[in-house]
Amino acid sequence: MFQSLLVPLDGSEFSERTLPIAGGLARATGAALHVAHVHVSHTPDHFLSNTQFHYEGLDLGEYDSRHREEEQTYLDQVRIRLSEVGAEAVDLALLEGHVADGIAEYAESIGADMILMTTHGYSGVNRLWLGSVTDALIHDTTLPILVLHPGQNGHLPPDVSKLHRILVPLDMSGLAEAILEPASELALATGAGLTLLHVTSASGVFGVRLLPLLPDALTPEMERAQDYLERVAERLRSHGLDVGVEVVNDTPAHG
């Protein structure tokens, strides 16, 4: 089971949408919940379009120190809100430096089992938390990352604390199966079911041409994938998990 969960926050309400599911996981598993914000020294937004002469009389060191104090106050307020919903074991960290590197290093130092985050903040310095940060973490850490993505209107639903079904794409490789352990732990902790998915492609590459596969060639591939998923599903069901399987014929991303 999870023992240490990390939630990076950028100070926006959007990024805090991760907290309900993180708090729920912490309560269900007894994991320690870590909340981190990376302090990045920056020039006040209203000075960004001005010339260097407009900096006269401005103590950037004092401004940075005040900004850091405001960030610490923000984290303290997050702790209070979490304690009000029963998440008591919360560790707060105000980190320094590059955002993605700071999160990755801190995650390693606390022995995090999972990072939970949204894909972006809103404006100003929070633009540093755009999808590039999530992308960097996905590439630079081996930890499972639960990423909450906004809908078409740019917002997350108000309640993301409940998971009902977890989709696990598998390509029949050992590398892809590495996600099964954290996905299973997440399912056990939340009571969610798992759906194992394999996508077969209806086309083959012949030289520089992309040609459709004939049904006679596609059917055995789909049957092989179905057998594979059923074997994996049986292993997971033996641990009390609700597991379904699905084989579709499409391109991997669309499928």
Image (cartoon, rainbow, N blue to C red):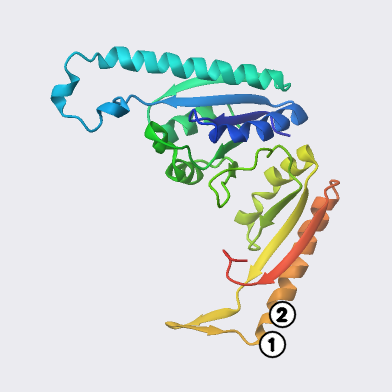
Q: Residue at x 19, y 13 (%)?
A: 57
User: Vertical placement of 182 versus 2: above or below?
Assistant: below
According to the picture, the residue beneath numbered tag 2 turns out to be 220
Q: Quadrant of the C terminus?
A: bottom right
Q: Residues within 10 Å of mark 2 (few under 14, many from 20)?
A: few
Q: Is 224 positioned to the left or the right of 154 in the image?
A: right
* Residue farthest along the left direction in this orientation: 53
Residue position marked by numbered label 1 in the rendering: 216
State the residue in front, 85 or 207.
85
Distance in Å between CA atoms under marks 1 and 2: 7 Å
**C-beta proximity under 8 Å, tags 1 and 2:** yes
Residue 218, visible in the rendered structure: yes
What amino acid type is highlighted by mark number 2? Pro
What is the x, y in percent for residue 20?
67, 32
The percent position of residue 63, horizontal first and vertical second, equals 32, 15
Q: Can residue 91 be seen?
A: no
Place residue 45 in its image quadrant.
top left
Q: Nearer the viewer, residue 100 or 18?
A: 18
What amino acid type should be assigned to the residue bearing mark 1? Asp
Where residue 7 appears, as percent x and y from the top left, is: 57, 31
In the figure, is residue 115 to the left or right of 57? right
- Seen from the viewer's position, the closer of residues 20 and 217 is 20
Give the residue at x 86% y 50%: 238
Q: Is residue 255 left or right of residue 239?
A: left
Q: Residue at x 44, y 36 (%)?
A: 100
Q: Give the answer, above or below, for where 109 lies relative to 221.
A: above
Task: Say which quarter of the image contains residue 229.
Answer: bottom right
- Identify the element where label 1 is drawn: helix
Q: Which mark is residue 30?
A: none
Q: Horizontally, is 100 left or right of 180 in the view?
A: left
- What secondary structure is found at the residue carrying circle 2? helix
Residue at 56%, 37% in the rendered image? 117
